[in-house]
């Protein structure tokens, strides 16, 4: 039974000065920084890399959630770090503006997203969320206040952005906005579906290199383990083959009509219902339902608003993605993107075939035109995010440690990145 001594000590600052005091008062104990409500994730939180497993001191920015000022003429907005992107977007909408890059979950905070770089299906147009930060305030690990931005202390600016809290706790940001009405910008999906992985990769490269007028773009590939199907009693099981399929969706602007509006409403209701069903499907018996819910994203609605599209995954995936999984994300220069994609896929499927470590292997991909990444390698990038469902066995020990097989996979991924000039994207 947990006692009061087991509960974390929590600081709840309301402004940057409070954060300074909290950091100084907590020393020498390391801090765990939480961007939003307890239990949030998806880039809303970031943690000090020196914090031990039994962290006891938490600094939550959930009370630092104000949108402080909007300069509509300059298309800038100043916010506290704990402000949710969905709330910032709602405030900007009153001025005919919106954030160019938002995550696909409504609880993501500005400071948390900036601290990990931040990506979305609009990154082929606007880069990372951190590329759209103009300046920021932060508190360093010693409790000292500082400011930095594109035009002053630029080196420090880049270290804090994407630093996951290791170089400083972001407390306030000034962000760029774009002119847009997300509730009335209608998009139509141009999906292409594939049963062959090589063809899917080739199509992905072409779409990333030449997106045209696509507002959003995303590719998803799903590769399932062989399925065991029960026969009549006493006759055992039959094993079906691996199922592989993928879809690339480019969403282009279109004009709303009454029929399109009706289709949008019908699709919205269906996704919400599927999300509720997936959320209620718990335990091993519910896995097929959750997988079906996640697979529904492979068949995204034909027409929807920009705001619908930005939060499409939040409707279904949050409920569907449960259970142990190995996840890795990589930025691959377009010149080596096909090789990186193939080598990572071969690595994961190879381990599944040899030791049965994984069940479903899925990948999400889109383009990233980031000035920061371009400066590092001289070219644009593709983003690759693999999720490999771990088969519940003794070889997997969850958060208590990484088994030998997963350590080998980590080392192999590092080798791939070094040889292909790719970079791992980490959020902690």
Image (spheres, helix red, strand yellow):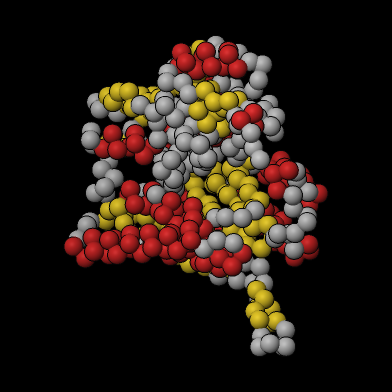
Which of the image's four quarters has the N terminus? top right
- In the displayed structure, 114 sits above or below 271; it is above
Pick the front one: 51 or 1: 1
Q: Which residue sits at x=38%, y=59%?
A: 272
Is residue 110 something that shows in the picture? yes
In the displayed orientation, state which residue is furthest to the left.
258
Q: Nearer the viewer, residue 291 or 207?
A: 291
Q: Is residue 155 visible?
A: no
In the rendered view, does 230 fall on the left or right side of 137? right
Q: Nearer the viewer, residue 160 or 82?
A: 82
Relative vertical location of residue 108 with respect to residue 185 in this rendering, above or below? above
The x, y position of residue 266, in whole percent, is 29, 64
Quadrant for the C terminus in the image: top right
Q: Position of residue 255 (x, y in %)?
A: 22, 56
Q: Residue at x 27, y 56 (%)?
A: 254
User: Quick one: which residue is furthest to the right in this view?
Assistant: 404
Residue at 60%, 40% (x, y): give it: 425
Relative to 68, residue 294 above or below: below
Q: In screen coordinates, is 34 left or right of 355?
A: left
Residue 192 pos. (x, y %)? 45, 65
């Amino acid at each position: 039974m947990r006692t009061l001594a087991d509960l974390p000590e929590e600081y709840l600052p309301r402004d940057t000065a409070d954060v300074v005091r909290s950091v100084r008062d907590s020393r020498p104990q390391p801090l765990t920084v939480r961007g939003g409500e307890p239990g949030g994730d998806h880039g809303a939180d970031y943690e000090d890399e020196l914090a031990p497993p039994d962290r006891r001191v938490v600094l939550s920015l959930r009370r630092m959630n104000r949108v402080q000022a909007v300069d509509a003429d300059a298309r800038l907005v100043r916010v506290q770090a704990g402000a949710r992107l969905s709330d910032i977007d709602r405030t900007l909408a009153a001025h005919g503006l919106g954030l160019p890059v938002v995550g696909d979950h409504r609880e993501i905070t500005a400071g948390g997203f900036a601290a990990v770089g931040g990506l979305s299906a609009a990154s082929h147009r606007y880069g990372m969320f951190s590329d759209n930060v103009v300046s920021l305030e932060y508190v360093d690990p010693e409790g000292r206040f500082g400011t930095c931005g594109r035009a002053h202390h630029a080196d420090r600016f880049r270290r804090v952005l994407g630093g996951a809290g290791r170089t400083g706790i972001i407390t306030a940001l000034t962000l760029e906005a774009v002119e847009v009405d997300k509730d009335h910008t209608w998009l139509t999906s141009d999906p292409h579906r594939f049963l062959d992985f090589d063809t899917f990769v080739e199509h992905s490269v072409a779409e990333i290199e030449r997106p045209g007028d696509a507002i959003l773009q995303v590719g998803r590939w799903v590769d399932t383990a062989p399925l065991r199907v029960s026969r009549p009693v006493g006759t055992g099981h039959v094993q079906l083959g691996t199922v592989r399929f993928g879809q690339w969706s480019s969403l282009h602007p279109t004009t709303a009509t009454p029929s399109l509006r009706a289709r949008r409403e019908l699709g919205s209701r269906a996704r919400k219902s599927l999300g509720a069903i997936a959320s209620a499907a718990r335990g091993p018996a519910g896995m097929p339902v959750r997988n079906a819910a996640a697979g529904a994203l492979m068949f995204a609605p034909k027409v929807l608003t920009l705001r619908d599209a930005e939060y499409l995954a939040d409707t279904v995936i949050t409920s569907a993605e449960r259970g142990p999984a190995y996840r890795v994300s990589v930025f691959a220069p377009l010149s080596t993107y096909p090789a990186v994609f193939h080598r990572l896929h071969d690595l994961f499927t190879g381990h599944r075939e040899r030791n049965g470590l994984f069940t479903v292997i899925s990948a999400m991909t889109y383009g990233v035109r980031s000035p920061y990444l371009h400066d590092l390698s001289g070219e644009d990038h593709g983003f690759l995010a693999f999720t490999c469902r771990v088969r519940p066995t003794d070889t997997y020990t969850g958060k208590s440690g990484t088994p030998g097989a997963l350590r080998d996979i980590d080392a192999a991924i590092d080798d791939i990145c070094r040889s292909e000039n790719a970079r791992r994207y980490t959020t902690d």
